Image (cartoon, helix red, strand yellow):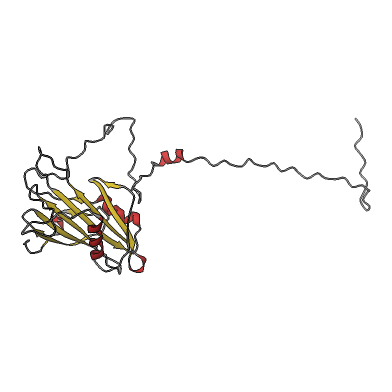
Amino acid sequence: MATRAVAVPPDRSLVLPPPGGPAIVAVTQRSYDNAVSQEIRLATRGATPGENAIYAAFFTSADVVDSEGVEGNLLKVPSLEDYAVSREMEERLPGVAMAPSAVFVQNKYGPFSYAFGHGVGGEACLYAWQGLSPGDSVFRSKSGAVSIRIRVCDPRATEASLLRLAYDYSINGSLARSGWNPIGNAPPPPANLGKAGAPIYPFVQPGAGGVSELPPRAAARARAARPRPAPSRVEPAETLAPERRLEGYPTVPPPANP
């Protein structure tokens, strides 16, 4: 069986929330022959039953089992199938109707999926899941795997703000095993980095659809100018001469011809 759950300091968390995200309250870790798993509990506010948490599991480059349950001291890789994820949501978000999103989303580690719903009092709830594995072949041994689950509810949040946790979390550890690299190598920097004529604008956080906004100047150019109405000329009212002479006023003689 797995080792008993032990509390580890927050700075040894395998996954970190993004800056400005929910604080880490406690971390519980279990060790297996083929994996290390952590339940990273986050600050929770709201009335929906359960705790905000990140569930992370790092699997070694060998003995990754696919059968149900834990065999001896081996941990099964959590499934990404709809039925398995639905059971997880029922356990970690009891009584909350969660609707899986049909929108394709991707963070710096690759594609992930999520479901959104409303908990007690209408508070926003999100459940995200992601599996990282480079794939295997006859000529390459298994490079390990990483499983991530995120459960978060917040009465003051929106779907887009909760998604930021899934977009911007960071993996903060690795397993000291030969060939362990489920994340892959870091991509090279952009070719135009540091070159003239290639301005870099401040990053705008993607919304729920994962689409970044245009830079301020580009957005201003893209926005069609609203036509202004032409100013209308007001003609002065014509003064009409009286048809009869007004009485009681002195008569002014006309000017003499030069």
Residue at 23% in and 36% down: 189
Q: Position of residue 241 (x, y in %)?
A: 87, 45
Horizontally, is 200 left or right of 189 in the view?
right
Q: Nearer the viewer, residue 67 or 8?
A: 67
On-image quarter of the C terminus = top right
Residue at 24% in and 45% down: 108
Q: Position of residue 210 (x, y in %)?
A: 33, 47
Q: Nearer the viewer, residue 204 or 91?
A: 91
Horizontally, is 76 left or right of 228 in the view?
left
Horizontally, is 50 left or right of 224 in the view?
left
Residue at 22% in and 56% down: 149
On-image quarter of the N terminus = bottom left
Q: Position of residue 4 (x, y in %)?
A: 7, 64
The quarter of the displayed image where residue 232 is located: top right
The quarter of the displayed image where residue 21 is located: bottom left
Q: Nearer the viewer, residue 35 or 253?
A: 35
Number of disc labels: 0
Q: Position of residue 168 (x, y in %)?
A: 26, 50
